[in-house]
Image (spheres, rainbow, N blue to C red):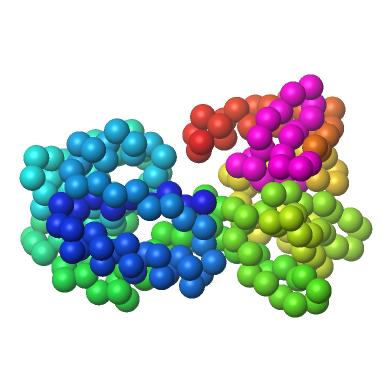
Amino acid sequence: MLQIAICDDILEQTVMLQKYIRQFCEKNGAEFKLHLYTTGAELLYDVEKFDIVFLDIEMPGLDGIQTGRKIREKNSSCRIIMETVMIERMKEAFFIEAFRFIVKPIEQAEVEEALAACMKKVLGSGSVELYYNRIAHEVHQSEIQYVVTYDSYSEYRVKNKMLRSEASLRELERQLDERLFFRIHRKYIVNMAQVQSYRNGIIRMKDTELPVSRRKKREFEQAYMKFDLKYR
């Protein structure tokens, strides 16, 4: 699920951004959660968990540039999208590695372009083409619980359904976000974000338990610990 924050002290701008973000995510089938802030200080309490932050440059107290610097100290991977009416301040934003700039008044097309670019970079936001009852569906990787591989096809567990792909194992592993997915067994690939618990070589997920092979046990434990520290 995409964690998206809006930090803007002007209510009208926040309402408009909410609308554009919601429409974009719903149109593209992306699961998301919005978090709203009116000051940089409020935002910084929670910033470690965000994938995308819409940040107004001109705010009372900590302005957007100062807030952006502090964001980078706590969360190096989130995508910062700066909102501004002051084009001359854009140079300052390069030092906080702003991903995109949106010039006020905010246009829906600019917001959608920025979100589309972000989603290509954010963990598990890429999609794969899968089939259910022979009908093709574009599925976001973050929604995949696990994959079962067979000789000539694979099955994906997505929202209590098993969808199918004819892609080869090599193609499958090329498509899936390696930060998110791990092969625990010659037959199983799991989405680490969907793992609820792990103990004694058994992964527990919603309504499912899967074994980790002896050969993969140590490697998985290290990868899962790293994932847990970095992304949860």
Measured as percent of width and height from the top left, residue 51 is found at 41, 48
Q: Residue at x 56, y 32 (%)?
A: 228
Q: Is residue 145 visible?
A: yes
Magenta extent: 189-208
Q: Is residue 134 above or below residue 93?
A: below
Measured as percent of width and height from the top left, residue 220 is found at 71, 31
Q: Is residue 43 above or below residue 134?
A: above
Q: Residue at x 23, y 43 (%)?
A: 68
Depth order, front residue of 135/80? 135
Work out which residue is located at the far right of the displayed protein and give it: 151
Number of marks in picture: 0
- Is 21 left or right of 200, judged from the image as shown? left
- Is 4 left or right of 216, judged from the image as shown? left
On whether residue 204 falls in the magenta region, the answer is yes
Measured as percent of width and height from the top left, residue 74 is found at 33, 33
Measured as percent of width and height from the top left, residue 113 is found at 36, 70
**Rendered image quadrant of residue 50:** top left
Q: Residue at x 51, y 36 (%)?
A: 232
Q: Is residue 90 visible?
A: no
Q: Residue at x 79, y 22 (%)?
A: 200
Work out which residue is located at the far top of the displayed protein and give it: 200
On whether residue 140 falls in the magenta region, the answer is no
